[in-house]
Image (spheres, helix red, strand yellow):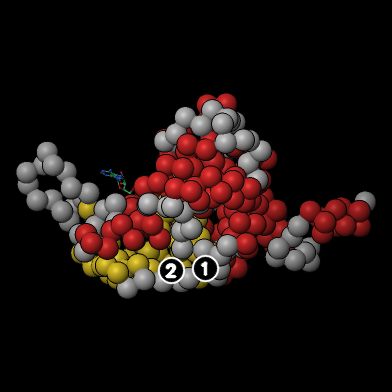
Amino acid sequence: MIEIQNVSFSYIDWEDEIDNEHSSRVLHHVTTSIMTNEFVALLGRNGSGKSSLTRLLNGIELPSEGAVQVEAQTTRNSHNIPSIRRAVQIVFQNPENQQVGLTVGEDIAFGLSNIGYPHEQIQERIAWAIDIVGLDADVDRPVTRLSGGEQQKLALASVLALSPRYLILDEATSMLDPVARKQFVQTLHEARKKHPFALIYITHHLEEVLEADRWILFRNGHLYQEGLPEQFLSDKTLLQECGLELPYLRSLGLTLRDRGIPVSTSLDVEELRELLCRFN
Ligand SMILES: Nc1ncnc2c1ncn2[C@@H]1O[C@H](COP(=O)(O)OP(=O)(O)OP(=O)(O)O)[C@@H](O)[C@H]1O
Ligand SMILES: [Mg+2]
């Protein structure tokens, strides 16, 4: 479990001699926890503090106040950082910024060598990781020859090879086209079924997190609300406050219901097709 206890956070501005800690706060008294194998979505408008929170979860940054504990290990103790970084991995938006090797194999091997993975097992692990994300490329393929979607699968393979217990995806799909995005999300969930880990998923696309166990909504650096997705999906005002847009079919479903047409709240393409046939 990751425990976030009354965490406030400001980035230190080294050029600013005056202590303006409070005015530059980007997170305010955030308290929540992420359970083992849970799928949690962190949602909110640009600048609401989602990425900043994730940097606190693996000790890249430390809380200005409060504490973050990963499986009872505080990020404040530097001795804990190597095992925390191993347990909590992050995939970012831009795959190019995460590549460390020239080839697919080198890229996956880098993290494994860093954690002292037995040398003779590294090739086996690379093959495992390529397989689990369904990357259609051999180990010698230069990373520059991969498409955006393939590069993001490689980034995912490189972190999954390290067996994270918590995986943070920070808008990892935002540079992919809709088809690649869907495929990537599918790959991710298939990998989770085979080797469970907690998923902390940041996105502006709500359709990617309809299946999440919990949504956490951020607003101006505050944890504004948290709960089951269904709790928020019919609350247009709340979603608007948090800069979130309902997926198209959900929005259409609500409009139809408002007009007295009885459709289910989770209107899908099939139901819509039947409805159109009936009205024809
Ligand atoms: N390295 C940094 N140094 C100083 N301020 C920063 C830094 N990174 C982010 N901020 C500020 O912290 C606040 C929260 O930013 P953060 O990146 O956490 O938001 P976010 O919710 O991830 O937004 P987005 O959806 O745009 O990614 C913003 O006001 C931002 O300008
Ligand atoms: Mg962000």
Which mark, by number, is residue 37?
1
Q: Which residue is drawn at 31% across and 57% down?
A: 82
Q: Mark 2 points at which residue?
A: 34
Amino acid type for the residue under numbered disc 1: Asn
Q: Which residue is drawn at 38% across and 68% down?
A: 2
- Does residue 156 appear in the picture of this structure? no
- Where's residue 50, x and y in %? 39, 54
Assign a secondary structure to mark 1. Answer: loop
Q: How crowded is mark 2: few (under 14 residues within 10 Å), some or many (20 or more)?
A: some
Residue 214 in the figure: left or right of residue 117: right
**Between marks 2 and 1 in the image, the one whose residue lies nearer the viewer:** 1
Q: Which residue is drawn at 17% across and 56% down?
A: 22
Amino acid type for the residue under numbered disc 2: Ile
- The residue furthest left is 17
Asked if the residue at tag 1 contacts the one at tag 2, i.e. Cβ–Cβ closer than 8 Å, the answer is no
- Where's residue 29, x and y in %? 28, 66
